[in-house]
Image: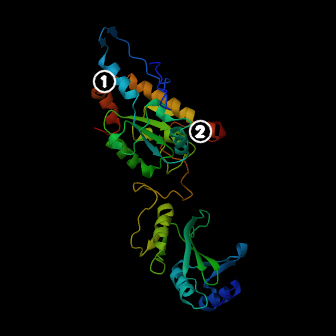
Amino acid sequence: MDMGLTNEIVKAKLTEKFGDALLNWEEPYGMLTFEAPSDLNLKVMQYLHDDGELGFTFLTDLTGIHYPDNKGSEIGVVYHLHNLAANVRIRMKVFTDINTPDIYTATSLFPGANWMERETFDFYGINFVGHPDLRRILNVDEMDYFPMRKEFPLEDQSRSDKDDEMFGRGGSYN
Amino acid sequence: MSDIIYTGRPVKFNNKVKMVEPPPGVEGEGFFVTKLSEVVGLGRKNSLWPLPFATSCCGIEFMATMASHYDLARFGSERVGFSPRQCDLLMVMGTIAKKMGPVLRQVYLQMAEPRWVMAVGACASSGGIFDTYSVLQGIDQVIPVDVYVPGCPPRPEAILDGFMKIQEVVGNESIRRRNGEQYQALLSEYGIQ
């Protein structure tokens, strides 16, 4: 078991395999982070998973993000992968247009992605192409929008009994 | 209570038993006349079976309310039930997410008439601080509520006060209320028949 897996090795191997396709390399708090083209997400993860030296066999987390100002790549998916043997973690991001939020599902590679992708769909409306059961998981089934997208206010819009002025908004605060 | 003390037994008679006042009526030798609704109300209000529907910190306060220090049993509610079929009083304590709304409603529907509902704490009453897309903005959006207890969370004293308010409502309720048009209209507002 090779315990000497470093960020430099991971970056070098990925660059060797995918060339300039992987962008925006960073190491916030020592965790290697990069951006991949959205149509390459499975290929990169498969390589990270299968390569003997890399061995990122565990999907710690999968979540979405919405940057409304990044025109053409507003919606992102963030994957956190973990090499359990060497205890190394990396973060991969993919971005897509909000009008076509299609991302290949990671469920074939990591069965644990199933519910995480459902949650990400529930809150951001990301369409995970090929997901076996893509429906809401946490919110009520009748919900007709994706509440974590920035255009939707946090507050419950059905409420009529609240005086906005008491909450520092609306009325004389405008 | 008799003053006889059985010296042979370690346990003495409990002479601190408290009795509720009888309802107003006419008393004579061997009989007592009063209104049926008064007697029914007296019986109901002093033997309420609460069904705790506790989802968060208000539920913790209720646990203290139930326990020996505050002792909800003093009010005739020794028997806290966990089956809606047997209970009279639904006590909703805590944040109710919108996804839980139908569950709460079903629990309410499973209770037999007459049934009462108490909303304990800010969340159950109005959504509280959770003015957000996922939280029900007060349980009165899905079921009718008799008494609201404010607080975040309310102290056990406040829950007891709310409970005594429920007793007041129960004791003064007409035995015909549940068949009345007004009550039927209230239920149909919630889509309950």
Q: What amino acid does circle 2 point to? A: Asp
Residue A139: image quadrant is: bottom left
B161 is higher (above) or lower (below) than B82 = above
Q: Residues within 10 Å of mark 2 (few under 14, many from 20)?
A: few
B169 is higher (above) or lower (below) than A106 = above
Q: Is residue A49 left or right of residue B142?
A: right
Chain of the residue on which disc 1 is drawn: B
Q: Residues within 10 Å of mark 1 (few under 14, many from 20)?
A: some
Given the current orientation, which residue lies at the most extreme front position?
B8
In front: label 1 or label 2? 1
Q: Nearer the viewer, residue B92 or B105?
A: B92
Q: Position of residue B65 (x, y in %)?
A: 53, 38
Chain of the residue on which disc 2 is drawn: A
Say which quadrant the C terminus of chain B sits in.
top left
Q: Which residue is painted at 69% across and 85% down in the image?
A: A6
Q: Which residue is painted at 36% across and 34% down in the image?
A: B115
Q: Nearer the viewer, residue A162 or B53?
A: B53
Q: Position of residue B7 (x, y in %)?
A: 49, 27
B175 is higher (above) or lower (below) than A43 = above
Q: What amino acid does circle 1 point to? A: Ile
For mark 1, give the secondary structure: loop
Q: Which residue is mark 2?
A: A164
For mark 2, give the secondary structure: helix
In three-dimensional space, the C-alpha distance between marks 1 and 2, rounded to whole angstroms, equals 43 Å
Label ID, residue B175: 1
Q: How many marks?
A: 2
Residue A79: image quadrant is: bottom right
Is residue B155 something one can see in this rendering? yes
Q: Position of residue B101 (x, y in %)?
A: 42, 47
Is residue A100 something one can see in this rendering? no
Say which quadrant the N terminus of chain B sits in.
top left
